[in-house]
Amino acid sequence: MVREFPCDNGVSTMTGRLAGRVAVVTGGGAGIGAAICQRLDQEGAQVLVADIDGGAADQVAQGLGRSIACQV
């Protein structure tokens, strides 16, 4: 099921597009990588947060719904 939600800026976004999919994000422990992880999670994907800093990856993963962290 795809649901649309309006953003604060008036642009609608779709959620659920990635339900049942797995995303691997390298560099997901901070910055743009962490933002990508959050967006993929919002879209319904299961996210593997991979980063050289395992603690940062774990912190990002804990804030997501369906995720796991990995130090690389």
Image (tube, rainbow, N blue to C red):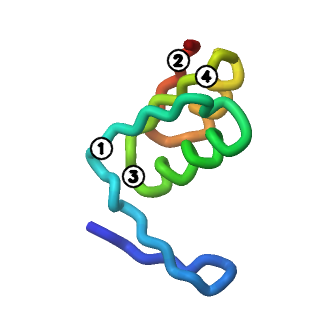
Disc nearest the viewer among 3 and 4? 4
The residue lying toward the viewer, choosing from 51 and 19, is 51
Cα distance in 3D space between marks 4 and 1: 20 Å
Residue 70 picture location, percent across and down: 52, 17
Disc nearest the viewer among 4 and 1? 4
Contact, mark 1 vs mark 3 (Cβ under 8 Å)? yes
For the N terminus, the quadrant is bottom left
Q: Earlier in the sequence, mark 4 or mark 1?
A: 1
As displayed, is residue 53 above or below residue 43?
Answer: above
Tell me the residue that label 2 is attached to. 70
As displayed, is residue 5 above or below residue 45?
Answer: below
Callout 3 amino acid = Gly
Q: Earlier in the sequence, mark 2 or mark 3?
A: 3
Residue at 43% across, 57% down: 43
Cα distance in 3D space between marks 1 and 2: 18 Å
Residue 17 picture location, percent across and down: 33, 61
Q: In the displayed structure, does residue 24 sit left or right of residue 2?
A: right
Residue at 38% across, 46% down: 45
Q: Earlier in the sequence, mark 3 or mark 4?
A: 3
Q: Earlier in the sequence, mark 1 or mark 3?
A: 1
Contact, mark 4 vs mark 2 (Cβ under 8 Å)? yes
Tell me the residue that label 1 is attached to. 21
Q: Earlier in the sequence, mark 1 or mark 2?
A: 1
Tell me the residue that label 3 is attached to. 44
User: Helix, strand or loop at disc 4?
Assistant: strand
Tell me the residue that label 4 is attached to. 51
Callout 1 amino acid = Arg
Contact, mark 1 vs mark 2 (Cβ under 8 Å)? no
Q: Earlier in the sequence, mark 4 or mark 2?
A: 4
